[in-house]
Amino acid sequence: MAGRDDNRGGGRGRGRDENPEFADRLVAINRVSKTVKGGKRFGFAALVVVGDQKGRVGFGKGKAKEVPEAIRKATEQAKRQMIRVALKDGRTLHHDMTGRHGAGRVVMRTAPEGTGIIAGGPMRAVFEMLGINDVVSKSIGSQNPYNMIRATLDGLQKESSPRSVAQRRGKKVADILRKEDGPKMDGEQAPVAEEA
């Protein structure tokens, strides 16, 4: 009997070691109740964000009678529905963007090195699991963590890297980047160096 328990424990450990690259963050846990004939039945709903901190992130929600089981279900769901996001220099976003879901709206802006993650709770969890080190973001509208995370992922899915833009337009990455570095408006001229 003891041998069987050892194997069962070892099996669970092996299951975790198969995906050591994934980190997870518990964002919210709610106690929900259902009124039945004999009184109330309590359950728990968990919201978890999972990522490899190298450009992949996903979220999941799980419900169960016990907290650990709800977290496990949420983590499994998050791993199944992960998205990939291209990061600039592996630390920030390529460009500013907004994301929406229901009444939730978020604004995310690229930031210089050393800025850190300036974001609220649920958004911070997404950025940390994604592997972003520098970002400035603001949540406008719904403060519901489910809507905030969905709006954040909606915005991140809109991001396009110079490589993907170049591939879509049939150009070289250097051509795309050169245009971005040039003058922003038609009437604007490049600065002229003054002679002494």
Image: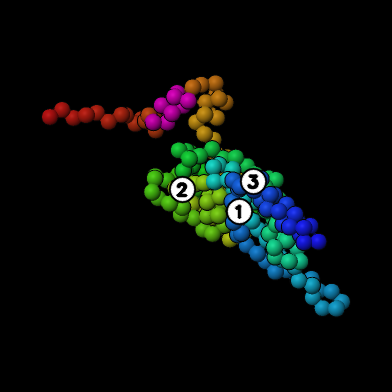
Image mark for residue 133: 2
Task: Classify 78 as above or below 88.
Answer: below
- Name the foreground residue: 113 vs 5: 5
Instruction: Inspect this view and state whether residue 64 appears.
Output: yes
> Magenta stretch?
173-181
Q: Position of residue 176 (x, y in %)?
A: 46, 27
Q: Is residue 46 magenta?
A: no
Colouring convention used in this rendered image of the protein? rainbow
Cα–Cα span, label 2 and label 3: 23 Å
**Observer-nearest of 6 and 92:** 6
Q: Residue at x 51, y 21 (%)?
A: 171
Residue that sits furthest to the left in the current view: 196
What kind of element bears circle 1? strand
Residue labelled with disc 1:
24
Task: Indicate which label's residue lies in the foreground, 3 or 1.
Answer: 3
- The amino acid pointed to by label 2 is Asn
Question: Regarding mark 3 in the picture, which secondary structure is present there?
Answer: loop
Taking the magenta stretch, the answer to whether it contains residue 174 is: yes
* Mark 1: amino acid: Asp
Q: Quadrant of residue 63?
A: bottom right
Q: Is residue 121 rendered to the left or right of residue 184?
A: right
Count of all numbered marks drawn on residues in the image: 3
**Label 2 vs label 3, nearer the camera:** 3
Image-quadrant location for residue 27: bottom right
The answer to whether residue 73 is seen in the rendering is no
Left or right, 148 with reference to 72:
left
